[in-house]
Image (spheres, rainbow, N blue to C red):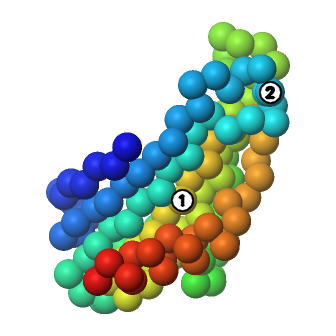
Amino acid sequence: MRHGARWPGRGESAVALSWVINPNPWPDYPSTQFYYTQSVYQFPSTKAAATYYNQARAKYAKCRAFQVGQISDLTDQAGITIQQSTLVTVEGTDVFTMNSVGGTNDPVPTSFMLKLINRVKKLR
């Protein structure tokens, strides 16, 4: 499923999102993915894209792409942990994100990000 919209407050001129949801993740828990998303935030200039990206990464890393991991324990489900891994990068006027949510905190492969960036470049 894909969705495009303009979200006020970020300064982007367009957004493209896609996601995949696992309808039955529990039989393989914790070696399962609950859902996966990817998005492209298009900004009117490289400066605007870099500003947004730099604000997002300020807490995490001093590199071109950064990856963030988060862990959540479900208080009403003993022993269930949800882990999220997010990869973010900037390329020209675009800020790309990939988000994976599952039972393990496997990093999003950078090869996936490169494929997304190349697909977007071909559309221009």
User: Which residue lies most toward the front here?
Assistant: 122
Cα distance between the residues tagged 1 and 2: 22 Å
Query: Is residue 71 shown left or right of residue 88?
Result: right
* Amino acid type indicated by mark 1: Met
Q: Position of residue 5 (x, y in %)?
A: 21, 54
* Amino acid type indicated by mark 2: Asp
Q: Position of residue 90 (x, y in %)?
A: 46, 80
Q: Disc 1 or disc 2, which is closer to the eye?
A: 2
Task: Work out which quarter of the rendered image holds the N terminus and state it.
Answer: top left
Secondary structure under tag 2 reads helix
Q: State the residue at coordinates (56%, 53%).
A: 99
32 versus 109 height, above or below:
above
Query: Is residue 1 shown left or right of residue 77?
Result: left
Is residue 59 among the parts visible in the rendering?
no
Residue under label 1:
98
Q: Position of residue 63 (x, y in %)?
A: 62, 83
Q: Position of residue 23 (x, y in %)?
A: 57, 25
Secondary structure under tag 1 reads strand
Q: State the residue at coordinates (45%, 69%).
A: 96
69 versus 92 height, above or below:
above
- Name which of mark 1 and mark 2 comes first in the sequence: 2
Pick the front one: 86 or 39:
39
Q: State the residue at coordinates (67%, 60%).
A: 108
Crowdedness near tag 2: few (<14), some (14–19) or many (≥20) residues, C-alpha within 10 Å: few
Is residue 98 among the parts visible in the rendering?
yes
Residue 73: quadrant of the picture: top right
Q: Which mark is residue 5?
A: none
Residue 119: quadrant of the picture: bottom left
Residue under label 2:
28
Q: How many marks?
A: 2
Query: Is residue 52 shown left or right of residue 89?
Result: left
Task: Work out which quarter of the rendered image holds the C terminus and state it.
Answer: bottom left
